[in-house]
């Protein structure tokens, strides 16, 4: 399970880093020679990247937490995240996730039918 959750937590940390650093990097770009349209684009990028990163961070952490509990939907969501990571700069996180997700113990852990809490 650690082979899956550690890359998820690492990707969360990278998204937090991107969320904090990206607007600052855009502010370092000299705006003197840019047109009004380019300035508008830079301002929206400086706002949009952190705003879009926050829901992704929350979703990834929920998937990691629920995957530890053995939720099947979290296993499917982790497969989707790993598939999204492969063709991106996060490919180094997607490979161990795929290896861990298709390990027999993890598949059985997530496929078990558990009784709801409080059931006799």
Image (spheres, rainbow, N blue to C red):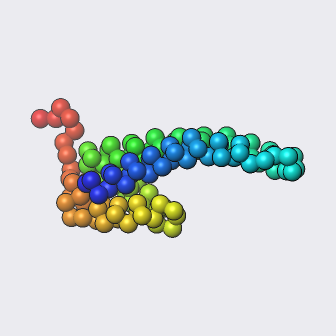
Q: Residue furthest left?
A: 120
Where residue 116 appears, as percent x and y from the top left, is: 22, 38
Q: Is residue 87 left or right of residue 61?
A: right
Does residue 5 sit above or below 101 in this rendering? above
Where residue 21 appears, as percent x and y from the top left, is: 58, 44
Pick the quarter of the image with the C terminus: top left
Q: Is residue 80 left or right of residue 113?
A: right
Where residue 41 appears, as percent x and y from the top left, is: 77, 48
For image coordinates 48% across by 49% down, the residue present is 14
Where residue 47 appears, as percent x and y from the top left, is: 67, 40
Q: Nearer the viewer, residue 118 or 40?
A: 40
For image coordinates 37% across by 54% down, the residue present is 7
Q: Nearer the viewer, residue 102 or 44?
A: 44
For image coordinates 71% across by 43% down, the residue present is 27
Q: Is residue 48 visible?
A: no
Q: Is residue 14 visible?
A: yes
Pick the quarter of the image with the N terminus: bottom left
């Amino acid at each position: 399970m650690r082979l899956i959750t550690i890359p998820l937590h690492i990707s969360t940390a990278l998204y937090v880093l991107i969320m904090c650093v990206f607007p600052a990097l855009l502010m370092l770009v000299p705006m003197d020679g840019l047109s009004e349209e380019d300035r508008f684009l830079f301002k929206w990028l400086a706002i949009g990247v952190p705003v879009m990163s926050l829901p992704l961070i929350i979703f990834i952490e929920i998937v990691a937490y629920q995957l530890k509990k053995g939720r099947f939907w979290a296993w499917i969501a982790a497969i989707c995240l790993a598939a999204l990571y492969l063709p991106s700069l996060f490919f180094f996180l997607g490979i161990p996730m795929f290896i861990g997700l298709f390990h027999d113990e993890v598949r059985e852990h997530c496929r078990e039918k558990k009784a709801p809490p409080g059931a006799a």
